Amino acid sequence: MSTGSMKELEARGLVLLGCGKMGSAMLEGWLAQGLPAGAVWVNDPHPSDWLSSTGVNLNMTLPDSPAIVLVAVKPQMMADTLPALAGFGNGNTLFLSVAAGTSIATYKAMLGDQTPIIRAMPNTPAAIARGITAICGNDLATDEHLDMAEALLTAVGQVVRLDGEHQMDAVTAVSGSGPAYVFHLIETLAAAGETQGLSAGLAMQLATATVAGAGALAEQADDDPAQLRMNVTSPGGTTAAALAVLMNEKDGFPALLTRAVAAAANRSKELANG
Ligand SMILES: NC(=O)C1=CN([C@@H]2O[C@H](COP(=O)(O)OP(=O)(O)OC[C@H]3O[C@@H](n4cnc5c(N)ncnc54)[C@H](O)[C@@H]3O)[C@@H](O)[C@H]2O)C=CC1
Ligand SMILES: O=C(O)[C@@H]1CCC=N1
């Protein structure tokens, strides 16, 4: 995190509304990067043992003017939880929300229309600083606000700035939910290995290392994923036999992932419409 952003957070405080899986993944990254626990206030009625052990200010009186309020409760909890923080609205506290499907317009209505708001869509690899977060702000979010949010989120992985909020449903469906698709790929690849006679432990080790290694190679190689796929595929060989199944336009990965990503994007839109 840049020294300026860190200083401002340390001086004014960072408030987390909700600290479950996503909030904890990010907080873990920030504490590991040197953000002092004393600069963090967490409001969460069900703190985990890990959270209680971090030394953050847990369910205590909040600072007068925190630099950032990070909103990381479930979208369905928003109407119950956000009004208590509306006192920080219309001021110089930046609201940074990671909630899927809660629009900037909804925050404006709950917090006041002069409130700087940034929507962010992170993902859980943030816990090991390998996340990717997409951000977009309202017209009151200044370049300094965007820089501060980016500095905070860069501590837990890559950050991309979106052209606008209209991209958020698709981003949520690709990278926000995406780690779950990849974990399920690992589960199902391992299960398929078991069907071929491997032990559960060996099949899981092979599947996990294969997905992790292929992901790292895709990120580091000069070749694009299509070329990397071709590099594995010998004509008339084993990979070609599997890809004939997986790349089948009718019921292979293309059709399946198109449907899955559309389902996630549609759900994101539904959440936005209450
Ligand atoms: N889990 C993920 O991979 C991602 C989640 N998100 C978003 O992050 C947000 C949180 O999701 P998760 O961390 O997965 O859910 P979670 O259920 O693990 O965390 C929600 C937290 O909110 C707390 N909470 C409940 N009532 C509260 C209250 N009245 N005041 C304060 N805190 C309260 C719960 O105790 C819990 O710790 C959601 O809006 C979701 O859309 C975004 C990107 C990825
Ligand atoms: O499942 C969800 O709604 C959240 C948003 C992206 C990942 N988890």
Image (cartoon, rainbow, N blue to C red):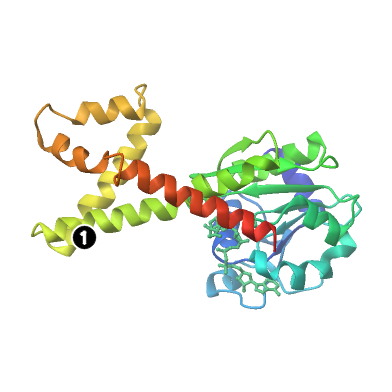
186 or 43, nearer to the observer: 186
> Splitting the image into 4 quarters, where does residue 7 fall?
top right
Above or below 129: residue 227: above
Q: Is mark 1 within 8 Å of ligand 1?
A: no
Rendered residue at 30%/43% (across/down): 250
Q: Quadrant of the C terminus?
A: bottom right
> On the picture, is 114 further left or further right than 177?
right
> On the picture, is 91 further left or further right than 200?
right
Looking at the image, in which quadrant does ligand 1 appear?
Answer: bottom right
**x, y percent for residue 220:** 38, 29
**x, y percent for residue 115:** 87, 51
Above or below 100: residue 161: above
> On the picture, is 179 further left or further right than 99?
left
- Note whether residue 273 is visible: yes
- Around disc 1, counting alpha carbons within 10 Å, would you say few (fewer than 14), some (14 to 19), or many (20 or more)? some
Rendered residue at 57%/62% (across/down): 24
Quickly name the residue at label 1.
191
> Splitting the image into 4 quarters, where does residue 272 fall?
bottom right
> On the picture, is 143 further left or further right than 128?
right
Q: Helix or strand or loop: what does disc 1 sit on?
A: helix
5 or 103, nearer to the observer: 103
90 or 59, nearer to the observer: 90
**x, y percent for residue 266:** 56, 53
Above or below 57: residue 125: above
Give, as a three-letter code, the residue at label 1: Ala
Rendered residue at 50%/49% (across/down): 262
Rendered residue at 65%/57% (across/down): 99
